[in-house]
Amino acid sequence: MASESSEGTHAGLTTKRKWLLIACCVFVALVVLPPDVVLLLATGLGAILVARRWPRSSRQRRWYRDVYLQSAHWRNTRHAALRIHGHRCAECGSPHSLDVHHLRYGNLWREDPARDLQVLCRDCHDEKH
């Protein structure tokens, strides 16, 4: 078996082919995926999807706050959760200062408002975190 140079090939792919594969994936992502998901991939913070827990790094938390929670997807999902859960805190029943809390961070961009989200008032939400 011929030995392969460590430079230029890896697992049978040349550097040129690797870049071509990456370019194809990026093109497909830009054409097929919604802009919010493309932004998620582009920022390199896919670890939030894999981690299935509250983002630990300050960069991940900043992305979650500044990008994800400002997206049209989140606004629509949040309104659906409030409607499904009756515009009341799940803990104390208060109808005031409501937040929508993620029960599973691993389901970002594909949340089921009935199973993955919980409506909480600000005080109860602060207790959860």
Image: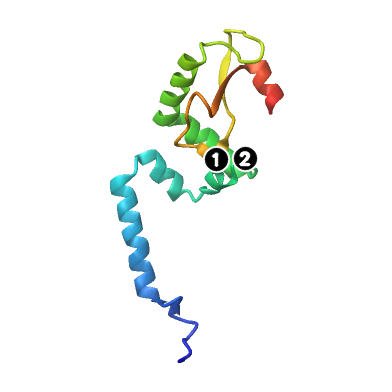
* Residue found at the far right of this picture: 127
Residue 26 image-quadrant placement: bottom left
Give how far across and how far down residue 3 sits, in percent: 48, 90
From the viewer's perspective, is residue 43 above or below residue 92? below
Q: Which mark is residue 124?
A: none
**Residue visible at 57% across and 15% down?**
98
Query: Taking 120 as reference, is 28 left or right?
Result: left
Residue type at numbered disc 1:
Gly
Looking at the image, tell me whether mark 1 or mark 2 is earlier in sequence order: 2
Q: Determine which residue is flagged by label 2.
A: 53
From the viewer's perspective, is residue 112 above or below residue 10? above
Foreground of the two, 118 or 62: 118
Of helix, strand and loop, which one carries label 1?
A: helix
* Residue found at the far bottom of this picture: 2
Give how far across and how far down residue 89 sits, in percent: 60, 13
Residue 39 image-quadrant placement: top left
Foreground of the two, 66 or 118: 118
Give how far across and how far down residue 41 sits, in percent: 44, 48
**Residue visible at 57% across and 22% down?**
118
Query: Taking 55 as reference, is 68 left or right?
Result: left
Query: Alpha-carbon neighbours of circle 1 within 10 Å: few (<14), some, or many (≥20)?
Result: some
Q: Which mark is residue 106?
A: 1
> Disc 1 and disc 2: Cα gap in Å?
7 Å
Q: Are marks 1 and 2 in contact (CB under 8 Å)?
A: yes
**Residue visible at 63% across and 45% down?**
57
Query: Taking 29 as reference, is 103 left or right?
Result: right
Residue type at numbered disc 2:
Arg
